[in-house]
Amino acid sequence: MRYVLLFLQLFIQRMFYLLVIAALILVLMFSCALADDFTVVDGDTIKTADGQRLRIEGYDTPEIFQPECDAERMLGLVAKARLIELMPGADVIYTGRVGYWKRPIIKVFVNGADVGEILIGENLAVPWAGKQHDWCG
């Protein structure tokens, strides 16, 4: 029985890795379709053509550059891929505020829907609670 459970655990882990690879392929495919004005950095940050990073207001996604664990990085890549899918045709609204890291705070809407609410609804983000979410706990 122990070997069966070990086998199932390894099988599920490998399937998860395949899902991440598929997400990376989507990132590459859709990055070409992203509007010229913005590049997706991660699930809650975009960059302008001149290099200015913009923080999307209202939600937090897993980190991909300095994650606390592999699961956080993988889910962060999926969130980034999803944001890349959503960005073409999106409306970017500057709030006039600046965040903690001196990044301008923006809102992003797709067909009138808040992109943060979309990602939260798909379990790729959580509402911003004033600090980063623990994705590994």
Image (cartoon, rainbow, N blue to C red):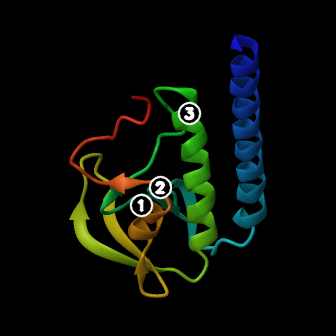
Q: Residue 57 sits in which quadrant? A: bottom left
Q: Is residue 133 above or below residue 70?
A: below
| Residue at screen point 45% across, 56% down | 45
For mark 3, does the 10 Å Cα neighbourhood hold few (<14), some (14 to 19), or many (20 or more) residues?
some
Q: Is residue 111 above or below residue 40?
A: below
In the rendered structure, are the residues bearing label 1 and label 2 in contact, judged by CB atoms less than 8 Å apart? yes
Q: Residue 28 sits in which quadrant? A: bottom right
Disc 2 residue type? Asn
Disc 3 residue type? Ala
Residue under numbered circle 3 = 71
- Classify the position of the N terminus by image quarter: top right
- Residue 65: percent from the left, percent from the top? 53, 36
Residue at disc 3, secondary structure: helix
Q: CA distance from mark 2 to mark 3?
A: 14 Å
Q: Residue 54 sits in which quadrant? A: bottom left
Q: CA distance from mark 1 to mark 2?
A: 5 Å
Residue under numbered circle 1 = 120
Q: Earlier in the sequence, mark 3 or mark 1?
A: 3
- Residue 46: percent from the left, percent from the top? 49, 60
Residue under numbered circle 2 = 123
- Residue 110: percent from the left, percent from the top? 49, 81
Q: Earlier in the sequence, mark 2 or mark 3?
A: 3
Residue at disc 2, secondary structure: loop
- Classify the position of the C terminus by image quarter: top left
Q: Is residue 109 above or below residue 123?
A: below
| Residue at screen point 48% across, 40% down | 63
